[in-house]
Every structure is written in structure tokens, then in C-alpha cells.
């Protein structure tokens, strides 16, 4: 019998019951099987596991209820928040994570947690966009041009109006099946219309391939959105500028992500709030 301390943290919000919840575990004694079972038991979009590392401050792994994934933004923000609350890191001090996506540089400043996002290649997606729109429940006149596909399988679909974004009802089974026969593993639908004047875009993220029909607030989708908007000419980015993206409002989990460039690297940043601390017996 093993006791495991676990913390549930809402990321990209400064209050409970908003943003995206993730579980965080600090342990160097868990097996891959145990991590998978804990993630399945928590049944959150991701559970983060921190452990010792020879090449960084900590090793960080992310599990959905279905599988281990290469990158997760909100669970990383939650992990930084946990380490900050536990006084294992200092304000404005460098923090590194060893991950499946390489070494990630992070830090905390003024209660906002920053995470480096790896740069990912992209190309325009022209493989039967009409079928994709049908799966998403969208009409052709709802969508704008320039579908962009990242090398990691994230597809970005622009729509013209935020009310269209709010009414999307995807066929999740069809979207999951599409991932088996195409490079599309997840879909980000976004609008340049926003709910708040300070924001630059609003998005929704669908990933049934990863066992997540809709993720409330997705760091790994918001970070690359900066490059997508720049590549498609929708936004002119000035170095050092702080952009804010919205997500989660249409499913009752509003979250806000700040995206910026530091030393030519994209960083996402946000607040977090610990809602639950407990102990698992496995």
C-alpha cells in the first residue's frame, strides 16, 4: 500500500471553479502504470507528475485519462503554482523541467506563472476542409480561410463571429475517427472577436483522440496561436507585447492566458488556484 499526496489546481484563473483543473503529484517512486491509473482515477484532462531529474530542476510528465502526452500547458502552470505554494521555488528565479518536449524554461513573477512553449512547425491544411467543417457542425460561410496544421497534429480553424464559436457542437465520434485516417489529432476553433476588449482572440479546443472531447483552457493551443495569427496576417505582433487569449467561457470554465515572446521564445502565462489537497492510497 502506497500513500500519494495529490493537489487539484485550477490553472489560468485566480479564483476557484474557473480555468482548467489539473492534478499535480510530486513523487519519484511511481511506475508508469501507477501514473496512468492515477490520471484515470482523477479523470481530469491532465494529471502532472513531478519527480527528480538529472538534467533539470524537475522531471515533468503529463497524463490524460487515456494516455501520456508530449505537452500540456495548464498542468505545467498548475505544477509551477504547486512548487511556488510549497516554497520549493523563488519568485523570478529560473525553473527548468525535463519533459518529452525537451527542457522547458519557466518562472513565477507577481503571482503569474510563465511557461516556455516549444516552437512547432506549421503548414496550410487543404485536405477536405468541407468534411472537417461538417464534423464540427459549421457551415462554410461561418469559417474564414487559412486552416493551419501544426506538426504535432493541432489544427487551427478560424471562424468569423464569436457567436458562431459559442454554438459549435462537434460530432466527437467522427472527429475521433478522423484522427485515425488523417494527421489531425486535435482542433482549435478560434475567433478574433472576443468577450473582453483587452483580448485578441477567443478559442475552443476539441481533442477526443486524447480522450478529451473539449478542454476548458489549453496552454499548448494558446501559445502556438500567436504564430498562427502572425502567419495568416491576422495579427501584427510587436516584440515584447503581451497578448491575452480567452477560452472556456462557453462551457462554464472561463480562463485567460497571456502570451508573449521572451528572447525569441514564446511563453504562456497565467494565474492558478489550489482547490483541493488530499492523499491517495494505491
Image (tube, rainbow, N blue to C red):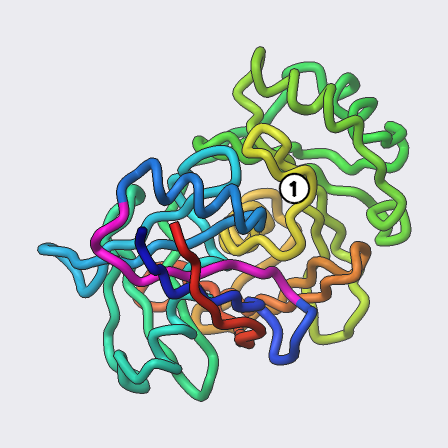
- Is residue 70 visible in the rendered image? The answer is yes
State yes or no: residue 27 in magenta.
yes
Crowd around label 1: few <14 · some 14–19 · many ≥20 (10 Å): many
In the picture of the structure, the residue carrying the numbered disc 1 is 188
User: Where residue 113 sits: x, y (%)?
Assistant: 43, 74
- Name the image quarter holding residue 178: top right
Residue 212 or residue 137, whichever sits in front: 212
In the image, residue 74 sits, relative to residue 62, either above or below, namely below
Residue 150 lies left or right of residue 126; in this view the side is left
Give the secondary structure at mark 1.
strand
Residue 164 lies left or right of residue 106; in this view the side is right
Residue displayed at 23% across by 53% down: 98
In the image, residue 198 sits, relative to residue 39, either above or below, namely below
User: Where residue 35 sits: x, y (%)?
Assistant: 37, 44
User: Where residue 92 sits: x, y (%)?
Assistant: 30, 84
Residue displayed at 46% across by 85% down: 111
In the image, residue 156 sits, relative to residue 111, either above or below, namely above
Residue displayed at 63% across by 32% down: 208
Residue 85 or residue 180, whichever sits in front: 85
- Name the image quarter holding residue 6: bottom left
Residue 190 or residue 90, whichever sits in front: 90
State yes or no: residue 116 in magenta.
no
Extreme-left residue of the structure:
54
Q: What span is colored magenta in the figure?
A: 19-30
Amino acid at each position: 500500500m502506497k500513500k500519494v499526496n495529490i493537489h487539484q489546481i485550477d490553472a489560468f484563473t485566480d479564483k476557484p471553479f474557473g480555468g482548467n483543473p489539473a492534478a499535480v503529484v510530486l513523487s519519484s517512486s511511481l511506475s508508469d502504470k501507477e501514473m496512468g491509473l492515477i490520471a484515470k482515477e482523477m479523470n481530469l484532462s491532465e494529471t502532472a507528475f513531478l519527480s527528480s531529474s538529472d538534467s533539470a530542476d524537475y522531471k515533468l510528465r503529463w497524463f490524460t485519462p487515456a494516455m501520456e502526452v508530449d505537452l500540456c500547458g495548464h498542468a505545467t502552470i498548475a505544477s509551477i503554482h504547486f512548487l511556488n505554494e510549497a516554497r520549493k521555488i523563488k519568485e523570478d528565479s529560473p525553473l527548468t523541467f525535463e519533459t518529452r518536449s525537451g527542457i522547458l524554461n519557466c518562472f513565477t513573477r507577481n503571482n503569474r506563472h510563465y511557461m516556455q512553449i516549444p516552437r512547432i512547425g506549421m503548414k496550410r491544411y487543404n485536405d477536405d476542409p468541407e468534411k472537417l467543417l461538417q464534423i464540427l457542425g459549421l457551415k462554410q460561410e461561418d469559417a474564414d480561410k487559412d486552416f493551419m496544421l501544426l506538426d504535432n497534429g493541432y489544427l487551427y480553424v478560424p471562424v468569423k463571429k464569436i457567436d458562431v464559436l459559442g454554438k459549435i457542437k462537434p460530432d466527437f465520434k467522427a472527429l475521433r475517427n478522423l484522427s485515425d485516417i488523417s494527421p489531425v489529432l486535435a482542433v482549435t476553433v478560434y475567433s478574433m472577436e472576443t468577450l473582453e476588449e483587452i483580448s485578441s482572440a477567443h478559442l475552443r479546443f476539441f481533442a477526443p483522440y486524447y480522450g478529451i472531447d473539449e478542454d476548458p483552457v489549453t496552454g499548448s493551443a494558446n501559445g502556438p496561436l500567436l504564430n498562427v495569427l502572425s502567419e495568416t496576417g491576422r495579427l501584427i505582433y510587436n516584440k515584447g507585447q503581451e497578448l491575452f487569449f480567452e477560452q472556456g467561457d462557453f462551457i462554464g470554465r472561463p480562463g485567460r492566458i497571456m502570451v508573449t515572446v521572451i528572447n525569441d521564445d514564446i511563453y504562456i502565462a497565467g494565474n492558478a488556484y489550489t482547490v483541493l489537497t488530499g492523499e491517495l492510497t494505491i
